[in-house]
Amino acid sequence: MNLYLVLLHLAGAVVLLLWAVRMVRTGVERSQEPALKSLLRESRGGRLRAAAVGAGVAVVLQSSTAVALLAAGFAGSGVLTLATGLTLMLGADLGSALVVQILSVDLHWLIPVLLVFGGALFFKGVSRPWRQGGRILMGIALILVSLQMIGEATLPLREAEMLPGIVGYLSNDFVTAFLIGAAFTWLVHSSVASILMVATFAAQGLLPLELGVSLMLGANLGGGLIALALTRNSVVEARRIATGNLLFRGVGAVLLLAAFHYLQPPLNMLGQGAARQIINLHLVFNLLLLVVCLPLTGPVARLATRFIKSLAIEPVPLVEAASCLDPSVVGQPTLALASAKRELLRMAEIIERMLKPLMELYETGDPEKIKQVKRLEEAVDQAQQDIKLYLAQISYPATMQEEERRAHELANFAINLEYVGDAISKTLVKLAETRRDQNLKFSPAGWRELNELHHRVMQNMQLALNVLMSEDRESARLLLAEKDAMGQAERASASGHLQRLRQGAAQSIETSNIHLETVRALKTINSLFASVAYPILAESGELLDSRLVRGNGGGAS
């Protein structure tokens, strides 16, 4: 086979592997983000617990880098200490090695099963978690498919004339091989994918054990570089975690590289064949890294605090001043409505900046961030006023009654968004201040419920904005279905809270009013977002007595 065609097939297989790994991570994040964040928040109960949580989350997300970004965010908000963040990362690195172990098992027989069930869940799932579960299953299936493709694509490389020379050179120059492994891992932004590729090449007989070990250790260094690069412009706490983790992985990888090539220890006890030995050594390396570095997280945290200082960056303006309303097109209703839609999106982005850090405000009660939310609410009020006045200036000919109706709907949605801003600033933020001032703590179950409801509202906000711009009926139906699901979740949370009160849970009693008012406010906000779907479905006759019609003219839901 032509060498260029072989490389093309290999490149396609590699891209599929990277995309499939990302697909699994996306599905997990979208369906289980509140639970994962709750786990990370609860990792402060000791080093072993934090390491176990980091490993578990990394296995679920199939990425230690994703754990690094989550931990960095919590450290930046004061929820995690730097030492705990470094412990989480040591556990996450071990979790990433466990993912490689799992995916290296021959599971080709499972591919059609995963594809069938994953596809059925994704296309026919009745709720978002079911659909994301389908995405996860299909992602795992595609990872297995991509590994098969890599194996098939590399078979002809055995006969390539230049391969023995390249392999021979890199086998003798383990430093260059180590740096290539690090650079490639950083380039593809996935140590899991990089090490699986190395193991696949070794299984095909393309790489000797010595070269595979060098590339594998380089991939561990590259994994640390990924997190460092992604946090380079973040808050100082995030950069300290990434730097400390890179220090652990980098020094450990260099030491093991030197020990392996100069001492030449036998690896027969790690399994049969170069591929299995490389994968098992990767696991042993990260396990040793955890054991050796766990007592060092405190000193390294102090060292990182001493040498990594805050960046002197110009503060980002709290609200962009530029409005999207274009007065020059007021005489052209179609263009004017498009301009109003863009301003509604800008208004929604401001609200997202108010709503997104809500759980952080409940946990830390940061006065400065609370002030920022209140200032953003003023910008929301101004945007709503500007949109109403702008839409009132548009004149509609008799032939453009549809456009006039749409203008009224946009004005109503602007009013609803302004109500959302009020609910955040005047209700939820005040509840966060009350919790802080009275030093109250939610029960673990209650806190988990609030995080899940908040996550659901954030997702439904994005869906509502998609409906606003696309006016797609199917998306509108999904939005109202999610509204009903939110109502069920709200009732379940209230019921669970009352059950905890009956059982006499002290934390539930102390935070009862805050919990119930928060749940009620989140439900109201979600309903305001969902209001964008009603005009679209009413126009097509899919609403009956203000309720969504199921199927083709079936009973009301």
Image (cartoon, rainbow, N blue to C red):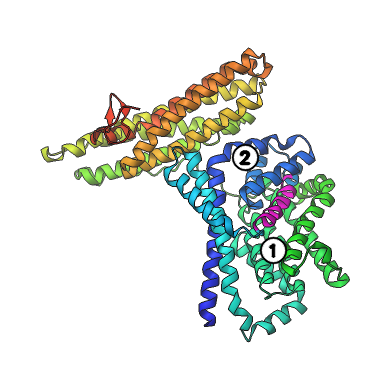
Q: Nearer the viewer, residue 305 or 484?
A: 484
Q: Which span is picked out in magenta?
A: 88-103
Q: Residue furthest front?
A: 109
**Residue 389 at x, y = what percent?**
28, 33
Q: Is residue 106 left or right of residue 298?
A: left
Task: Give the amino acid at mark 1.
Answer: Ala
**Residue 92 falls inside the magenta stretch:** yes
What residue is at 63 percent from the left and 44 percent from the top? 70
What residue is at 50 percent from the left and 38 percent from the top? 353
Task: Give the amino acid at mark 2.
Answer: Leu
**Residue 306 at x, y = what percent?**
77, 48
**Residue 211 falls inside the magenta stretch:** no
Which is more N-terminal, label 2 or label 1? 2
Mark identifier at residue 219: 1
Q: Is residue 336 left or right of residue 493?
A: left
**Residue 311 at x, y = what percent?**
64, 50
**Residue 320 at x, y = what percent?**
44, 43
What is the secondary structure assignment of the residue under circle 2?
helix
User: Which SS type dominates the magenta stretch?
Assistant: helix
Label 1 with label 2: CB-CB less than 8 Å: no
Disc 2 marks which residue?
36
- Number of residues whose C-alpha sits closer than 10 Å to that of mark 2, classed few (under 14), some (14–19) or many (20 or more): many
Q: Nearer the viewer, residue 334 or 126?
A: 126
Q: Nearer the viewer, residue 263 or 140?
A: 140
Marks 1 and 2, how far apart in space?
26 Å
Q: Is residue 107 above or below residue 375?
A: below
Regarding residue 491, the answer to whether it shows in the image is: yes
What is the secondary structure assignment of the residue under circle 1?
helix
What residue is at 52 percent from the left and 80 percent from the top? 4
Mark identifier at residue 255: none
- Number of residues whose C-alpha sits closer than 10 Å to that of mark 1, classed few (under 14), some (14–19) or many (20 or more): many
Regarding residue 422, the answer to whether it shows in the image is: no
